Image: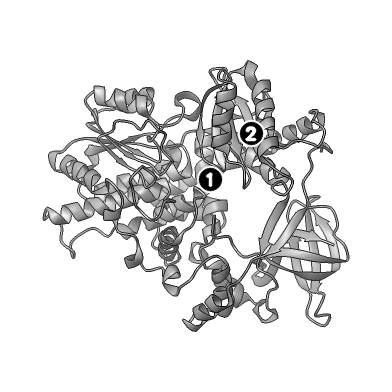
């Protein structure tokens, strides 16, 4: 690895715990350790972590959800044909499945429902005019288009659909641009004037809320009453998967959606496709955690959109046939193994490129990489891996079928990626064909001969915006784990909670004496440690994945807790994430 751009040291920072809040949470019946963890993450009352569905924000608070409900209720009643325009990631796939299953539950006939999903390399992102034409070519021709997890930037596509006589309902969670599409209805918690308190709904969450509003509209029309109405909570396993896989902030509302989905899965009430995905991933649904969504199921769904056809993922989530679900899950698992192989090759190529690329004095503040062998479907994953490794904003580009460079970027706190792209577009108007995204993730398309200019411009903006303090990686920790909490029951309690983006899983930190260490499979460090302040305590087993260098005999170790099951025996294990002398 180039000495000008190396993995930075990590500063371990213990989270502040409001003592009174932690005490109040404990007094309300919450386990003392959880009370401390919740208080450190901003929870102020037990109601905030109450998982009951009655605490969900009402669908009437989501701007235009009632109007979308009226349009869809009319479509069902009039027998209009509806086409869901999906997206090629896990959030888009789950949102499509929720839309199709939910509309059918609420009275739409099977022959009224259809869906299309873009091919990443052919159609681009969102409701483009070619996607509209693809939908119109369906038999029978649709009357209504419903976008899920896309469409808020699809001005041309919506205009094309409206010109063809179609009604368009846009459901999306993304930040809108100044010029929003002229759809019949837009449901988006981030659109101007929307006072919906949870701005972090995933695309599947937005669609679920539209279905809640539609059910309320149908009750008002007398189609259902409180007793006969469909139970839309049957869709929450899919909502939970898409929410976690989309890495949206797990605010109180999103945590409830995820918690309720996990509750259904653990009790065995899950869709056949999810059951099959748990099986091929080697995970037990009765012990399901949010981490299973992010690291086991989500990647297998995403792999279809990256390397193949997201239709496979959507069909897996939509089928009610367990045998068909098993076949599709096996196919997704095979594609995911291929994705991992492609990703490993791209990462190796990227690391070789790093050793060869010249860097300005003082090192690089940001990075843009391209290689002819890079795969367009995996650039985002590789950018994310490099960002984690280097703690720098990173863009990775692949050559698309049209010859343009398709790039995906990932950023660090303190560097708003979309704002950076906007500034680059003003300084270099000819460099980018298009761009979009958010603070931490964004994408752009370049003409091949402008890669050098883009790379230089990105470096200049990063050098202006990022100071040495921002470029120093900081890892928030939860301090020392009480000795009496290093037990299987406490670890199961921790793992059963909903952790994720913006509500991170606990990382404990304490001084450890390293009793033994060895490298497994040439890439993982296996350790036996003991708390330095408890020389008589039992040794603990620890694993540091993707780390081969030894640690000092005594080190401050930051770690997560996990359960290691081997030959029918379950033990507590530390998963090391950082260590310093």
The disc placed on residue 570 is none
- Circle 2 residue: 395
Task: Check the image and report above or below for 377 versus 496.
Answer: above
Placement of the C terminus among the 4 image quadrants: bottom right
Give the image location of residue 311, x and y in percent: 42, 36
Residue located 81% across and 28% down the image: 356
Residue at image point 80% right, 30% down: 360
Closest to the observer: 264 or 271? 264
Q: Is 30 located above or below residue 50 in the figure? A: below
| Numbered tag placed on residue 300 in the rendering | 1
Cβ atoms under marks 1 and 2 closer than 8 Å: no
Question: Does residue 383 appear anywhere in the picture?
Answer: yes
Name which residue lies at 21% across and 25% down.
165
Comparing 1 with 548, the one in front is 1
Query: Of discs 1 and 2, which sits in the foreground?
Result: 2
Residue that appears at 69% across and 26% down: 456
Left or right of 196 in this view: 79 = left
Instruction: Please provide percent x and percent y for residue 253.
Output: 41, 60
């Amino acid at each position: 690895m180039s000495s000008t751009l190396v993995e930075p040291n990590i500063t371990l920072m213990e989270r502040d715990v409001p003592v009174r809040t932690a005490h109040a949470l404990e007094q309300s019946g919450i386990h003392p350790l959880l009370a401390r963890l919740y208080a450190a993450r901003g929870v102020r009352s037990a109601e905030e972590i109450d998982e009951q569905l009655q605490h969900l924000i009402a669908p009437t608070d989501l701007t235009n959800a009632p109007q979308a409900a009226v349009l869809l209720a009319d479509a069902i009643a009039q027998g209009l044909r509806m086409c869901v325009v999906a997206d090629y990631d896990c959030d888009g796939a789950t949102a499509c499945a929720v839309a199709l299953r939910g509309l059918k539950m609420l009275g739409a006939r099977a022959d009224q429902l259809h869906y299309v999903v873009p091919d990443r390399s052919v159609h681009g992102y969102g409701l483009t005019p070619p996607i509209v034409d693809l939908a119109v070519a369906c038999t029978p021709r649709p009357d209504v288009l419903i976008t899920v997890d896309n469409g808020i930037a699809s001005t041309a596509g919506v205009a094309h659909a409206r010109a063809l006589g179609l009604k368009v309902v846009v459901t999306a969670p993304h930040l809108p641009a100044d010029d929003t599409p002229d759809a019949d209805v837009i449901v988006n918690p981030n659109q101007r004037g929307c006072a919906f308190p949870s701005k972090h709904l995933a695309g599947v969450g937005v669609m679920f809320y539209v279905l809640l509003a539609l059910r309320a509209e149908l009750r008002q029309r007398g189609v259902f009453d409180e007793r006969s109405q469909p139970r839309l909570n049957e869709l929450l396993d899919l909502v939970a998967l898409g929410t976690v896989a989309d890495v949206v902030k797990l605010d109180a509302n999103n945590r409830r959606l995820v918690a309720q989905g996990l509750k259904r899965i653990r009790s065995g009430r899950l869709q056949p496709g999810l059951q099959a995905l748990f099986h091929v991933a080697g995970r037990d649904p009765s012990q399901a955690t949010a981490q299973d969504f992010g690291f086991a199921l989500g990647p297998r769904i995403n792999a279809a959109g990256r390397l193949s056809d997201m239709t496979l993922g959507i069909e897996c989530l939509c089928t009610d046939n367990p045998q068909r679900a098993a076949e599709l899950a096996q196919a997704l698992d095979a594609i995911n193994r291929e994705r991992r192989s492609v990703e490993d090759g791209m990462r190796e190529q990227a690391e070789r490129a790093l050793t060869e690329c010249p860097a300005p004095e003082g090192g690089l503040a940001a990075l843009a990489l391209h290689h002819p062998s890079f795969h367009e479907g995996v650039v985002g994953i590789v950018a994310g891996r490099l960002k984690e490794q280097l703690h720098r904003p990173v863009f990775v580009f692949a050559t698309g079928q049209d010859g343009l460079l398709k790039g995906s970027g990932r950023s660090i706190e303190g560097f708003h990626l979309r704002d950076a792209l906007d500034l680059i577009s003003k300084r270099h108007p000819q460099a980018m064909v298009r761009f979009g995204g958010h603070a931490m993730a964004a994408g752009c398309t370049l003409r091949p001969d402008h890669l050098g200019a883009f790379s230089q411009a990105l470096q200049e903006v990063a050098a202006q915006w990022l100071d040495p303090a921002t470029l120093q990686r900081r890892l928030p920790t939860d301090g020392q784990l009480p000795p009496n909490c290093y037990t299987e029951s406490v670890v199961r309690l921790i793992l059963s909670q909903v952790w994720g983006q913006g509500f991170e899983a606990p990382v404990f930190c304490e001084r450890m004496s390293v009793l033994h260490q060895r490298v497994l499979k040439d890439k993982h460090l296996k350790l036996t440690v003991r708390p330095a302040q408890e020389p008589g305590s039992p040794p603990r087993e620890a694993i540091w994945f993707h780390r081969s260098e030894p640690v000092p005999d005594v080190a401050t170790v930051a770690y997560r807790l996990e359960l290691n099951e081997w030959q029918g025996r379950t033990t507590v294990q530390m998963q090391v994430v950082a260590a310093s002398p």
